[in-house]
């Protein structure tokens, strides 16, 4: 597997762990881990933009990604950790996994 996919998969795994902590109501640990995971989310998104530039047929929906991240930020600002976990689980991770499947 290539390094690009590895970076995205690492980010996905971290977010899965953070989501589980949120659902377990371990809020302090979840927020601490999420703070670290955000850096890897940014790296994964950068990798996707680079990958798209290198592969003409790769479809990256910037609007969808932006909407997901805005929704997550709104939930975080409102301290709604259940909504944040749901957005990460059902929007962000689903889209990241969809993109991973479409990478060579």
Image: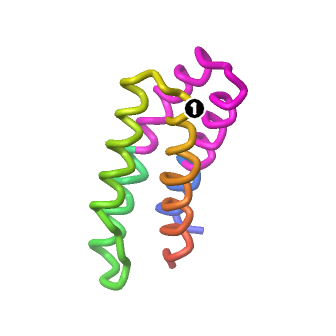
Which is nearer the eye, 54 or 95? 95
Residue 76 sits inside the magenta stretch:
no
Q: Position of residue 83 (x, y in %)?
A: 52, 36
Q: Secondary structure at mark 1?
A: helix
In the drawing, does residue 6 fall left or right of residue 47? right
Give the mark count.
Answer: 1
Q: Position of residue 5 (x, y in %)?
A: 52, 63
In the drawing, does residue 4 fall left or right of residue 24? left
Residue situated furthest bottom in the rendering = 57
Which is nearer the eye, 51 or 87? 87
**Is residue 50 shown above or below 78?**
below
Residue situated furthest right in the rendering = 24
Residue 16 sits inside the magenta stretch:
yes
- State the residue position of label 1: 82
Which is nearer the eye, 20 or 37? 20
What residue do we see at 37% from left, 53% from top? 45
- Bounds of the magenta span? 12-41
- How crowded is the residue under tag 1: few (<14 C-alpha within 10 Å), some, or many (20+)? some
What residue do we see at 53% from left, 20% from top? 32
Q: Which quadrant of the structure image shows residue 58?
A: bottom left
By what rule are the colours in the image chosen? rainbow
**Is residue 68 shown above or below 52?**
above
Q: Which quadrant of the structure image shows residue 14?
A: top right
């Amino acid at each position: 597997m290539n390094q690009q996919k590895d970076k995205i998969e690492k980010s996905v795994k971290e977010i899965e762990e953070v989501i589980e902590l949120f659902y377990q109501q371990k809020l302090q640990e979840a927020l601490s881990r999420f703070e670290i995971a955000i850096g890897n989310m940014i790296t994964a998104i950068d990798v996707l933009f680079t990958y798209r530039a290198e592969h003409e047929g790769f479809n990256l929906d910037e609007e969808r990604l932006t909407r997901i991240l805005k929704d997550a930020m709104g939930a975080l600002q409102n301290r709604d950790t259940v909504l944040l976990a749901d957005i990460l689980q059902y929007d962000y991770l689903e889209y990241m996994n969809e993109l991973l499947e479409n990478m060579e």
